[in-house]
Amino acid sequence: MRLIILGPPGAGKGTQSEFIVEHTGALHLSTGDIFRENIKNGTPLGKRAKEYMDRGALVPDEVVNDIVTDRIKSMGPEGSFLLDGFPRTVNQAVALDGALEEIGVTLDCVININVDKEALIQRIVGRRVCPTCGKSYHVTHFPPKVDGVCDDDGTQLIQRDDDQEETVRHRIDVYERQTTPLIDYYKAQDNLVDIDGNQSVQEVKDRILAALQGVQRA
């Protein structure tokens, strides 16, 4: 299957991606992983991206598109993937469509997880992380046994800078502005599935897998 997963920060994309990959056997492709692979292997595209990253500049769409679509095309028509973090814009979506057309396939489904803004903020602002082992907690939904202390190694938990409320609100606003045209683009293609992400992890999982079963039957 050829899938995309969309959702704002805190929507649970990472968790649901694991379930999707386990269910479909698709390869989970994140933009970050593809970039790191190209840079590590010293590919021409990786070197181009590194030039921008080394000077603290954003990697332009042209380079991002080339890196991701090159990976997609390398999988051929039999490739099965779940794209996470790409596309982010309509321009990137058009580039992806072009790459898929080159190998004679189309997208099967675009999964869009919707969560109320205030619920997202509560989820993210309440996160606490162990700086030693990286284990993540939540002050309400998954608190440590001892307040503010990691269960595994006793380290004092921290709140990451990008989990501060003001930063979180900004991240969500940017996502909404950037992604609304993209969602409209896939709605026009009739391959977008909206999933209510305000439910439990299990309920979200069940709805996604039910939607994918419908795609497979079609």
Image (tube, helix red, strand yellow):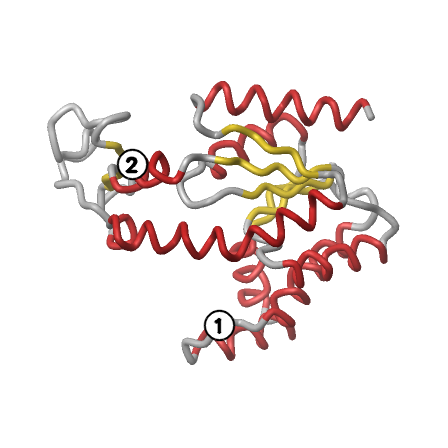
Residue with the mark numbered 2: 122
- The one nearer the camera, 212 or 135, is 212
Q: Quadrant of the N terminus?
A: top right
Q: For this view, does 205 lie left or right of residue 120?
A: right
Give the vertical position of 95 relative to 215 (above or below).
below
Q: Label 1 sits on what residue type?
A: Leu
Q: Residue furthest right?
A: 104
Relative side of 185 to 28, left or right: right
Tell me where residue 50 appears, x and y as whole percent: 51, 74
Q: Position of residue 78 (x, y in %)?
A: 81, 42
Q: Is residue 205 above or below residue 46?
A: above
C-alpha separation, residue under disc 2 versus residue under disc 1: 29 Å
Mark nearer the N terminus (2 vs 1):
1
- Locate residue 81, reporting x and y percent: 68, 42
Tell me which residue sits at (48%, 51%) in the image: 176
When asked about the image quadrant of residue 117, the answer is top left
The numbered dot on residue 5 is none
Residue 115 is left or right of residue 47, and the answer is: left
What residue sits right under mark 1 in the picture? 58
Q: 185 above or below 112?
A: below
Indicate which label's residue lies in the foreground, 2 or 1: 2
Could you say where residue 72 lies in the image, as x and y percent from the top left? Answer: 72, 54
The residue at the point 29 percent across, 55 percent down is: 167
Q: Quick one: SS at disc 1? A: loop
Q: What residue do we see at 26% from left, 42% from top?
A: 125
Residue in view at x 48 percent, y 30 percent: 197
Bin the neighbour count of mark 2 within 10 Å (Cα to Cα): few under 14, some 14-19, many 20 and up. Answer: some
Marks counted in the figure total: 2
